[in-house]
Amino acid sequence: MVTTTAQSATRRAILLTIKKRGEARAEELAQSLGITPSAIRQHLGALVGERLVAVREQRGAAGRPKHFYSVTSAAEEMFPKTYGDLTCELLTYIKKEEPRMVDHIFDQRRLRRGEQARARLAGKSFEERVAELASILDEDGYLADVERGEDGTWRIVEHNCAILEVALRYGQACSSEINFLRDVMPDADIDRVSHMASGGHHCAYVVKPKAKPARTQASIGSSVTRRPPTKCGSTPRSRRWTSSHPCCCPFRSPEPTRARRGARAS
């Protein structure tokens, strides 16, 4: 009985052999790996089903058609990649020449991702935007999903860090990530509660709507425009007074006394 581990090792060997050859037939793989052609065809059938291997058929003038196998782009991730090492090396050179340029580069990455994400989030409800944001992160290679908590919050979990090698050496990668999330969800409070670069098994973010500020009585009172009480003395001299209270109206000429009226009459 062939174990799953043995099958994985055999299929990886088949993929590696095809990768080196560019294309290979089942008979050639059997001879190279020391496995029977029938066993090779079984593994190739599984790899084709997983879309890790493509098959090309070539028909001749006579006899059965020949089948040539090649690896697909999906299988490329199974081969060694040093993108992280290369990125860190280039950032080291940039930091040596211009230290502030590293921050600028991560800021530009954040702005570019934000512009693309906002176009996809436009017009959606809060819950739909959280789900779409998790989909964006998943497409970026973070193996992200989202779940709704009983307390009404959402939790976005990244089970993989697509730039872990960079994040371990440059903290700007992680700060840029959470700032990107906050940029595209300005009406949300977003906090990181788990962090791979700090030893966590995953990166996780709690997302909840921002609380609306409560209107206190003081704020309500301050929003009402009050007209200051009018005093008689505050009225300009040029204004004609009609008040019936001369005692409190210093600019109003008092009523002429009877003595003065009598003097004028004479």
Image (spheres, grey):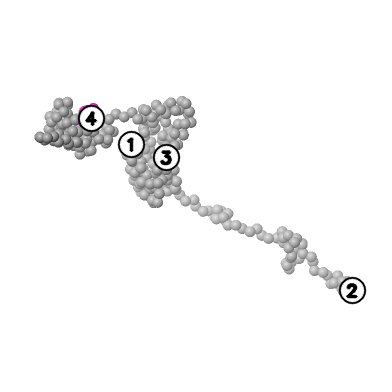
Mark 1, other Cα within 10 Å: few <14 / some 14–19 / many ≥20: some
- Residue 175 visible in the snapshot: no
Q: Quadrant of residue 197?
A: top left
Q: Nearer the viewer, residue 33 or 241?
A: 33
Residue at figure coordinates x 39%, y 28% from the top left:
88
The correct choice, above or below, for 179 with respect to 223 in the image is above
Q: In the visual, does 189 lie left or right of 238?
A: left
User: In front of the other: label 2 or label 3?
Assistant: 3
Question: Magenta stretch?
Answer: 16-23
Residue type at the position of mark 3:
Arg
Residue closest to the far left = 63
Q: Label 2 vs label 1: CA separation?
A: 112 Å
Q: Which residue is mark 3?
A: 112
Marks 3,4: beta carbons within 8 A: no
Q: Which residue is mark 4?
A: 22
Mark 3, other Cα within 10 Å: few <14 / some 14–19 / many ≥20: few
Query: x, y (%) of residue 90?
Result: 40, 28
Q: Which residue is mark 1?
A: 160
